Amino acid sequence: MNLDKDWLDILEKYGEIKRVYIECEETDPQLKTNLQPLNEFRAALDHVMKMQTALYVDEDEEEYYKQKEKLNSHLNRAFYDICDMLSINYRNKIIDIIETYDVDVITAAVPDYYSEKRQIIEDISLRIATYRNQKGGRSVDTVERFKEYSDDVLKLKEIYVEILNKQNVLEEVKGKVKKADGTQRHKDWIAGGVIGAIGSALVALILHMFGI
């Protein structure tokens, strides 16, 4: 048995899970009511104990690897549950901000949103769909896949934080656009009134000339 390799993989996976779990705790209040990841952790710990029993008490190599496989299954489910929640959370937060502003306001306040950031979000969303569709396969549920998914989720966080920090600018630009629109409408109203007055005067003059 290659115990060092076994436990290195398990510890690296746990490290990635812990990283995204802490992130999720800080950004998603609903996580406190979602017990599924905690249930997976509890089950994973039980299989860790059974692995140790098989190794040091029963000296049963077959049972050891059986428990290791079950442990990995629980770690995988915990990771995907947490990352799925966190990725949806960040994408919703981005949408909540963006959908409250017009395109011209967003373009002025966050110039690279439509040219770069939106494409990055779409690319990440496609990769996340792939992660979710492929999860459960032994060949893909690796430490490397964990890192790919968690890095994508944290990239969504970076975009969200950047847009969040631009909210003052967004509001400022929105105010200027609204003021400019109001000024233009006022000018249009005045112009319309002048044209209307001129029209009325011409009609009155024509009527007077024809004695009507």
Image (spheres, grey):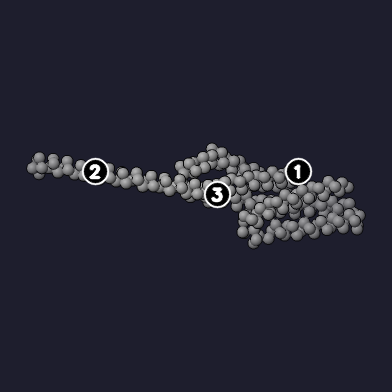
Query: Which class describes the residues within 10 Å of circle 1: few (<14), some (14-19), or many (20+)?
Result: few
| Coordinates of residue 212 in the picture (x, y in percent) | 9, 44
The residue beneath circle 3 is: 164
* Residue annotated with mark 1: 139
Say which element carries label 1.
loop
Asked if residue 128 can be seen in this view, the reply is no
Vertical order, 172 against 29 (above or below): above
Using residue 62 as the reference point, say whether residue 180 is left or right of it: left
| Residue toward you, 185 or 50 | 185
- Give the left or right position of residue 195, taking residue 49 as reference: left
- Estimate the x, y position of residue 195 in percent, counting from the top left: 24, 42
* Secondary element at tag 2: helix
How far apart, in angstroms, are the residues tagged by discs 1 and 3? 38 Å
Distance from disc 3 to disc 2, alpha carbons, whole Å, reads: 45 Å
Viewer-side label of 2, 1? 2
Which amino acid, by three-letter code, is at mark 2? Val
Q: Nearer the viewer, mark 1 or mark 3?
A: 3
Residue type of the residue flagged with mark 1: Ser
Q: Earlier in the sequence, mark 3 or mark 2?
A: 3
Which residue sits furthest bottom?
33
Task: Give the residue at x 71% y 45%.
Answer: 147
Is residue 29 positioned above or below 188 on the image? below
Residue at the far left: name it.
211
Write the residue at 69% across / 43% down. Answer: 148
Residue at x 77% of width, y 56% of height: 44
114 and 44: which is toward the camera? 114
- Determine if residue 28 is in view: yes
Q: Quadrant of residue 194?
A: top left
Mark 1 and mark 3 residues within 8 Å of each other at the beta carbon: no
Expressed as whole percent of the image width and height from the top left, the position of residue 155 reads 63, 45
In the picture of the structure, the residue carrying the numbered disc 2 is 194
Front one among 201 and 37:
201
